[in-house]
Amino acid sequence: MVLDDGNMFKRYSFKLFIINDPPYFEQPLEDKKIILGSNIEYQFPKILDIEGLTPQMTVLYQGYSKLPSFVSLSGANINFNPRKFKDIGLYKIDIILKDELSVPRSY
């Protein structure tokens, strides 16, 4: 015969959330206005990653990796050197940050 009142233990539980936040810029990116014929070098802000993983940066124009002819990348800098009349206009350059485990974060 076994006696059991059903209340001889108390159950505890907790939830475990496993996350990986994508890398991010330490400061917001700034819009730029450039005069035709000038040369501007813009240094990207420092890239941070909460988990300490190595960040990767991709620069896109209209969804493609081919940038306008007057735009070039050099390490953590992007250079703008518009010289031709056809370069005048509004351009949206997308910056995507990711690490080897994250969903990319776009700017």
Image: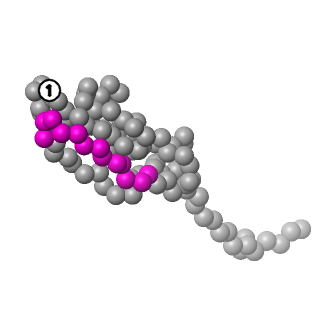
Q: Residue furthest right?
A: 1
Whole-percent x, y for residue 106 in the image? 35, 42
Horizontally, is 91 left or right of 67 in the view?
A: left
Whole-percent x, y for residue 3 in the image? 83, 72
What residue sits right under mark 1 in the picture?
Answer: 84
Q: Is residue 38 magenta?
A: yes
Picture residue at 29% right of the left edge, 51% below the top: 29
Picture residue at 33% right of the left edge, 33% below the top: 72
Instruction: Mark 1: give few (<14), some (14-19) or many (20+) Cα within 10 Å.
Output: few
Question: Looking at this view, is 42 or 17 the one in front?
Answer: 42
Question: Looking at this view, is 49 or 40 the one in front?
Answer: 40
- Image quarter of residue 40: top left
Question: Looking at this view, is 4 or 48 the one in front?
Answer: 48
Picture residue at 58% right of the left edge, 60% below the top: 15
Residue 92 can be seen in this image = no
Residue 100 can be seen in this image = yes
Q: How many marks?
A: 1
Main SS, magenta region, reads loop
Quadrant where the image shows the N terminus: bottom right
**Region of the chain picked out in magenta, as a range:** 35-47
Picture residue at 14% right of the left edge, 26% below the top: 84
Q: Vertically, is 42 above or below 91?
A: below
- Image quarter of residue 63: top left
Q: Is residue 77 magenta?
A: no
Whole-percent x, y for residue 10 in the image? 69, 73
Looking at numbered disc 1 in the image, what kind of residue is underneath it? Lys
Q: How is the image coloured?
A: one colour
Q: Vertically, is 49 above or below 101?
A: below
Q: Secondary structure at mark 1?
A: loop
Quadrant where the image shows the C terminus: top left
